[in-house]
Amino acid sequence: MSGKAGKTMAKVIMDAIRRQMLDLRVCLPARIEKYDHSAQKANVKPLFKKQYIQKLSEGDSGRAELPVITDVPVQWPSAAGGSAYLHLPVASGDLGMLVFADRSLDAWLAGSGQIVAPSDARIHHIKDPIFIPGLRPFGNPLSDTSAANTVLQNNQMRIEMEPSGKISISGASEEFLTIVDSLIGHLIDARVITAAGAMPFYHTTITALQDDRSRLATIKRT
């Protein structure tokens, strides 16, 4: 059986299904355009083009950029009712992933986390994404990572933690625990001016400083 323009009924049905599938959103890479850190929401640009069933003209590619999506919630790890969290300094141009909700997020985002009824019938719609920072292409990976250690880095500030329990805290040119170790060493070698001349600290103080230095060595990365 043929329909309009010689299409079979099967073709018409498959085109209709494909048209619906092309408007169904699941997840895609995206880029931050603007971020509101106080509300943890962003304007986000999807980095996949939309594909159309039919080309509008002979030279038409059948694809077009998706628009910037405004007021997108940004996901951050948090617990204890929000009193414990990790928040990063997101900036325009940062990459990540958009995940699209099953139903409309409007009513839930307007509340405080309770169970809600979706405000309309839309499903996997482009208006209902959540942005998760950090997705990166293979051509632009993170640099100076570790295969074994946990690394927290903010520009020139870096904290690196080994599974053994050792840690390093470093800035642009200095490592914090190295400075602490050096300070303890200076205190151990220091002299106090007395009536009898320059004298070291009391033995108990020296012993305590040496103990502190030994304890520091158990967590300091070398």
Image: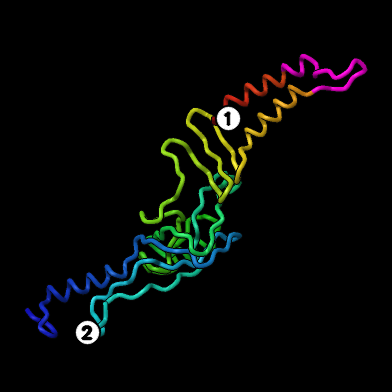
How packed is label 2: few (under 14 Cα within 10 Å), some, or many (20 or more)? few
Quadrant of the image containing the C terminus: top right
Residue at disc 2, secondary structure = loop
Residue at 57% in and 48% down? 156
- Name the outermost residue toward the right: 195
* Front residue of this view, candidates 214 and 86: 214
- Residue at numbered disc 2: 58
From the top left corner, tell me how far across and down residue 220 is, in percent. 58, 30
Question: Is 116 above or below relative to 126?
Answer: above
- Residue at numbered disc 1: 220
- The way the protein has been coloured in the rendering is rainbow
* Picture quadrant of residue 1: bottom left
Q: Is residue 61 magenta?
A: no
Residue type beneath disc 2? Glu
How packed is label 1: few (under 14 Cα within 10 Å), some, or many (20 or more)? some
* Front residue of this view, candidates 102 and 34: 34
What is the distance, in whole Å, between disc 1 and disc 2 at their CAs? 66 Å
* Picture quadrant of residue 215: top right
Residue type beneath disc 1? Lys
Residue at 23% in and 79% down? 54
From the top left corner, tell me how far across and down residue 165 is, in percent. 52, 29
From the top left corner, tell me how far across and down residue 55 is, in percent. 24, 80
* Picture quadrant of residue 58: bottom left
Q: Report the span colored magenta.
A: 191-207
Residue at disc 1, secondary structure = loop
Residue at 49% in and 33% down? 162
